[in-house]
Image (tube, rainbow, N blue to C red):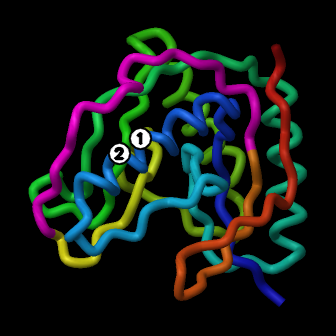
Amino acid sequence: MTKRVFIALALPPDIVDDVFENIDILTAANKLQKINWVKKEGIHITLNFLGRQSEAVIDQIDRRLKILAKKTTSFKVRLAKPGGFPNLSAPQVIWLGVDGGVKENKRLIDFQRELKVALKTLPVTLDKRVWRPHITLGRGKNRAKLSIPRLGINEKTFPLSRVQLIESELTTSGANYNIINEYKLRP
């Protein structure tokens, strides 16, 4: 049996609450748009989506994440402006940017690269596109222009200290997430 899995950075609970409150603001401002907004338990920063993997490969990913977490020190980042893929004019994905200033953002980018290096000898497909750290807020169905009201979370700084290996089960009402394992970074 295979599982659809990805690796993410977990956010502190107060940041998850703030992000979710702002999803409510976006929902109210875009009532006529067809958007699947992220559920509260789905708020995180995706590092790598790995697709369907066997239990044997998931065990190997788990071992490598344990090693990487033990040698990585936690770091801080800050929330940035909302955006969209491919753009906010007709987004398929609506997101909140994550930035850390030059020094901390480099640590975040370096961590994601180290993760790719740790996984590159496994039979997984790693995204070759430039990684843009973000928190997905929703997925648009009709790619219509959104109304983006002023959100109350820009520039909030917070620590990232937990990495999660997560199973994603797709349903008609969106994805359900099951944490397979969590790894604490060094303080």
The residue that label 2 is drawn on is 25
Magenta run includes residue 88: no
Q: Is residue 90 left or right of residue 118?
A: left
Confirm whether residue 105 shows in the render.
Answer: no
Q: Amino acid at mark 1?
A: Asn
Question: Quadrant of the image for the C terminus?
Answer: top right
Q: Distance between the Cα atoms at labels 1 and 2?
A: 5 Å
Give the quarter of the image for residue 138.
bottom left
Residue sitting at x 59%, y 37%: 17
Residue 81 location (% of width, % of height): 29, 31
In this rendering, is residue 148 above or below 72?
below
Residue 23 location (% of width, % of height): 42, 48
Magenta run includes residue 156: yes
| Mark 2 surroundings within 10 Å by alpha-carbon count, few (fewer than 14), some (14 through 19), many (20 or more) | some
Which span is picked out in magenta? 144-163
**Tag 1–tag 2 contact (CB < 8 Å):** yes
Residue sitting at x 49%, y 39%: 19
The residue that label 1 is drawn on is 22
Q: Main secondary structure of the magenta part?
A: loop
Confirm whether residue 142 shows in the render.
Answer: yes
Q: Is residue 119 left or right of residue 147?
A: right
Give the quarter of the image for residue 66.
top right
Residue sitting at x 52%, y 20%: 77
Nearer to us in this view, 34 or 47:
34
Q: Secondary structure at mark 2?
A: helix
